[in-house]
Amino acid sequence: MAEKGVKVFGMWASPMVIRVEWALRLKGVEYEYVDEDLANKSADLLRYNPVTKKVPVLVHGGKPIAESTIIVEYIDEAWKGGHPIMPADPYERAQARFWARYAEDKCNAALYPIFTTTGEAQREVVREAQRCLKTLEAALEGRRFFGGDAVGYLDIVVGWLAHWLPVIEEVSGASVVTDEELPLMKAWFGRFLAVDAVRAALPDRDRLLAANKARREQLLSSA
């Protein structure tokens, strides 16, 4: 039974939703998951998040919280015991938030066009994405995880890359995170996906691959 009415409104293929599930699982919090059809959003989702009407939404004790990174921080504060997500040191917390914002604003924006381009245009996009990820990779220097010896806030925020990006690479024919270009990031992919709480929440790869193939074909045909 979910603890004190903990409920997650999500969508199975969303890399933002899985952040919330990872945080809850790392904390050992049981929760009820509600998978939304984003083309036909439920009355509950619209009631709990009337502003953006997006997933994820965490409902705890009847109170809703929206936006994945905000939810992850809330989870760490609401369940202080167990696995720490945010760094204890104020400077380290600020650094984690800085890199998370960089990844959200810069790297995600650089990666998306890989999915929607071909040929030389795609190769230039890949080079730009690699430059962005190389900057982010600096935060891994000398660490097993972005959070240090264990998964932390930044790992949760950028962790979708480890599962989704190889799917995007396969669908688009691009190679972004390679042993030659981004060795620390590539090694981190393997370590992150081996964490039990991470692996337990991953969507089925074949289903994700099929959905992304269909989406890419649709985008390219309408371009």
Image: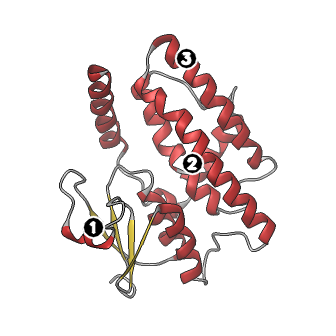
Kindly identify the amino acid type of the residue bearing the numbered disc 2.
Glu
**SS label for mark 3:** helix
In the rendered image, the quadrant that contains the C terminus is top left
For residue 118, what is the image quadrant?
top left
Amino acid type assigned to the residue bearing label 3 in the image: Arg
Residue 135 placement, left or right of 157:
right
Q: Is residue 146 above or below residue 177?
A: below
Quarter containing the N terminus: bottom left
For label 3, the residue is 123
Task: Report the Cα–Cα distance between label 2 and label 1.
Answer: 24 Å
Q: Secondary structure at mark 1?
A: helix
| Viewer-side label of 2, 3 | 2
Asked if the residue at tag 1 contacts the one at tag 2, i.e. Cβ–Cβ closer than 8 Å, the answer is no
Q: Which mark is residue 45?
A: 1
The scheme the figure's colours follow is secondary structure
Q: Which residue is mark 2?
A: 104
| Among numbered discs 2 and 3, the one appearing first in the sequence | 2
